[in-house]
């Protein structure tokens, strides 16, 4: 490490396909030259870890699984930090937030930064207590929305001066499509003239897919609607079975994790985010940036993105009837659909671009480096 470059280690359990992982990928792509990025995967690389490596950023894979049953795995993270000697450790997601920050504090890394991207109402009490203790050695926690900041401070009893709101951002280049709409629909087995919705999210309870399925099954006006389910996760088999039980299997297309998001967004008429709890979902921002009309639940940071009735529609969480009615309204009224889609795109492009996010993060790094010096 040269004196002119500050080494930053981005630490996560694994860089799977998700919003937090996309943040790290965008950071290593766009950090100014005065920073030297490195990535550390505590357990395994994951698909985004492989993409980070392709940028030329060093990616270490430790093969560890720290937890209450394997507490000494923290020593492996410490050994990596002792070898690389970063000036900044920036952690993402739960395992790194707990054990990565602990290792960085024990190794006396000059600057330790955590990240909170969701409102975790169901966070285990011992996790919240651990984070409360870790705050003493943490310089900042970056949160994805103002609502996340308020909840985190209350939950962890964090010093408000140590919690900064920096809105998540997306690389809107991902929203560009290269495959014509008709060709993409044909490749997916979707009728060319059918209304098509899409959801991009991990297949977990948090994302509320089951309420979207119930809305499709129970709302008569949505009988022609097809749905692209993009993402993988623990509920894959359960959701496939649920779609079958509801009689909508022929209209629900499980595509798994995909990286051709621009082409997929170009093939749909509206985007749906039926989450039960959230932070600030990047897939929603990306879809709006692609000019796709959005229907989402009014949880956490989503109302900070969607202005109900102007840039999209908001509904209560876990309310299949309200969700179905909102989707039906968007499907039935093309003029309204195009109006909210255009307004949504105009709203998110200047607020959630990568350049603004990287600038905010690097300004935080500079301030903390100056204080540490």
Image (spheres, rainbow, N blue to C red):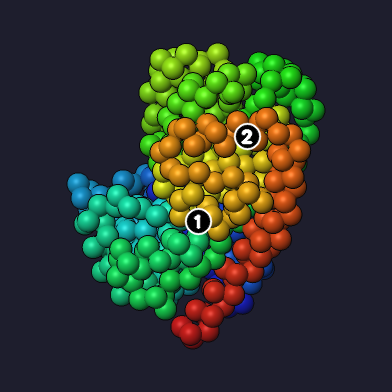
Depth order, front residue of 55/95: 95
Count of marks placed on residues: 2
Residue shown at the point (50%, 56%) measured from the top left: 301
Q: Secondary structure at mark 1?
A: loop
**Counting residues from the N terminus, which is met first, the one under dot 2 or under dot 1?**
1
> In this orientation, which residue lies closer to the viewer: 196 or 132?
196
Residue named by callout 1: 301
The residue indicated by pointer 2 is 329
Q: Is residue 155 above or below residue 65?
A: below
What's the CA distance linking mark 2 and mark 1? Answer: 23 Å
Residue nearest the observer in this picture, 154 or 214? 214
- Looking at the image, residue 174 sits to the left or right of residue 155; the answer is right
Q: Answer yes or no: is residue 210 visible.
A: yes
Q: For residue 184, which quarter of the picture?
A: top right
Give the side of residue 30 with respect to residue 146, left or right: right
Q: Secondary structure at mark 2?
A: helix
Q: Bin the neighbour count of mark 1 within 10 Å (Cα to Cα): few under 14, some 14-19, many 20 and up.
A: many
Q: Position of residue 42 (x, y in %)?
A: 39, 50
Residue at left offset 62%, top offset 18% = 224
Q: Residue at x 19, y 46 (%)?
A: 69
Q: Quadrant of the N terminus?
A: bottom right
Q: Position of residue 364 (x, y in %)?
A: 54, 74
Q: Is residue 77 above or below residue 6?
A: above
Q: Residues within 10 Å of mark 2 (few under 14, many from 20)?
A: some
Taking the image as shown, residue 219 lies to the left or right of residue 238, namely right
Depth check, mark 2 against mark 1: the one in front is 2
Q: Where residue 275 sits in the image (x, y, percent)?
A: 46, 42
Is residue 55 in view?
A: no
Q: From the viewer's perspective, is residue 150 above or below residue 203? A: below
């Amino acid at each position: 490490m040269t004196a002119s470059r500050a080494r930053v280690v981005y630490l996560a359990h694994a860089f799977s396909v998700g919003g937090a992982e996309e943040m790290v990928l965008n950071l290593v792509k766009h950090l100014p030259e005065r920073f030297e990025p490195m990535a550390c995967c505590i357990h395994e690389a994951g698909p985004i870890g492989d993409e980070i490596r392709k940028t030329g950023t060093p990616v270490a894979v430790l093969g560890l699984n720290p937890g209450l049953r394997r507490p000494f795995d923290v020593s492996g993270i410490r050994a990596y930090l002792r070898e690389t000697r970063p000036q900044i450790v920036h952690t993402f997601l739960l395992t790194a937030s707990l054990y990565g920050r602990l290792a960085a504090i024990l190794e006396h890394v000059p600057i330790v930064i955590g990240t909170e991207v969701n409102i975790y109402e169901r966070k285990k009490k011992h996790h919240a207590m651990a984070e409360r203790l870790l705050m003493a050695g943490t310089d900042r926690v970056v949160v994805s929305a103002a609502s996340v900041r308020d909840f985190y401070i209350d939950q962890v009893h964090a010093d408000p001066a140590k919690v900064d709101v920096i809105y998540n951002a997306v690389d809107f280049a991902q929203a560009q499509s290269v495959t014509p709409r008709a060709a993409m629909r044909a490749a997916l087995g979707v009728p060319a003239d059918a209304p098509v919705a899409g959801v991009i999210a991990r297949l977990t309870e948090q994302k509320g897919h089951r309420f979207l399925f119930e809305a499709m099954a129970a709302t008569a006006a949505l009988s022609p609607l097809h749905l692209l389910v993009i993402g993988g996760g623990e509920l894959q088999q359960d959701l496939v079975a649920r779609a079958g039980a509801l009689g909508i299997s022929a209209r629900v297309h499980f595509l798994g994790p995909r990286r051709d998001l621009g082409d997929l967004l170009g093939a749909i008429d509206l985007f749906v985010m039926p989450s039960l709890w959230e932070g600030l979902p990047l897939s929603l921002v990306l879809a709006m940036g692609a000019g796709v009309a959005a229907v989402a639940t009014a949880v956490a940071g989503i109302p900070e993105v969607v202005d109900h009735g102007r840039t999209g529609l908001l509904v209560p969480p876990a309310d299949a009837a309200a969700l179905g009615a909102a989707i039906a309204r968007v499907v039935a009224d093309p003029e309204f659909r195009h109006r909210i889609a255009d307004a949504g795109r105009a709203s998110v492009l200047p607020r959630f671009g990568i350049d603004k996010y990287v600038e905010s993060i690097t300004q935080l790094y500079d301030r903390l480096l100056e204080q540490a010096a």
